[in-house]
Amino acid sequence: MKIHEISDLLLYCAAVNYAILFVWFAAFAFTHDGLHRLHKRWFRLSVESFDTLHYAGMSVYKIGILLLNLVPGIVLHFSS
């Protein structure tokens, strides 16, 4: 694979991962109570801890997208 192809692949992966993050946020925002009831059956979670876990998970996922897909893709794009 050429550097340009790898750069395009990384940027495509970043777009797909951001779409997944958007779907996660939309599901969390619009079906919050239903998701909380579902998870409450399995775990003892208060609303605050449920919100904290999801917010932290989305933050870690977003940082992972930035560090593993977006930054290397941009660097390879400008270096070629």
Image: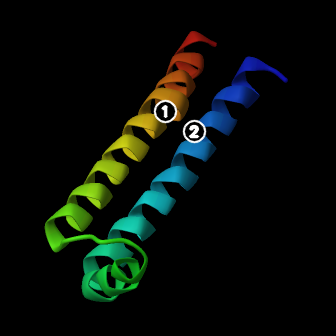
x, y (%) of residue 48? Answer: 14, 66
Residue 3, label in figure: none
Q: Quadrant of residue 49?
A: bottom left
Distance CA(mark 2)–CA(mark 1) = 6 Å
Residue 62 position (above or below residue 66): below
- Looking at the image, the residue that sits furthest to the top is 79
Q: In the picture, which quadrant includes the C terminus?
A: top right
x, y (%) of residue 75? Answer: 52, 17
Local secondary structure at mark 1: helix
Task: Please name the residue shown 27% across and 81% down the image.
Answer: 32
Q: Residues within 10 Å of mark 2 (few under 14, many from 20)?
A: some
Are the residues tagged 2 and 1 within 8 Å (C-beta)?
A: yes
x, y (%) of residue 67? Answer: 45, 27
33 or 3: nearer the eye?
33
Residue 12 position (above or below residue 27): above
Residue 28 position (above or below residue 9): below
- To which residue does mark 2 refer? 11
Task: Please name the residue shown 40% across and 64% down the image.
Answer: 22
Local secondary structure at mark 2: helix
Of the residues shown, which amino acid type is indicated by label 1? Leu
Task: Please name the residue shown 73% across and 19% down the image.
Answer: 3
- Looking at the image, the residue that sits furthest to the front is 44
Q: Earlier in the sequence, mark 2 or mark 1?
A: 2
Query: Left or right: 43 with respect to 76?
Result: left
Of the residues shown, which amino acid type is indicated by label 2? Leu
Residue 70, label in figure: 1
x, y (%) of residue 51? Answer: 22, 64
Q: Residues within 10 Å of mark 1 (few under 14, many from 20)?
A: many
- Looking at the image, the residue that sits furthest to the right is 1
Count the labels in the image: 2
Q: In the picture, which quadrant includes the N terminus?
A: top right
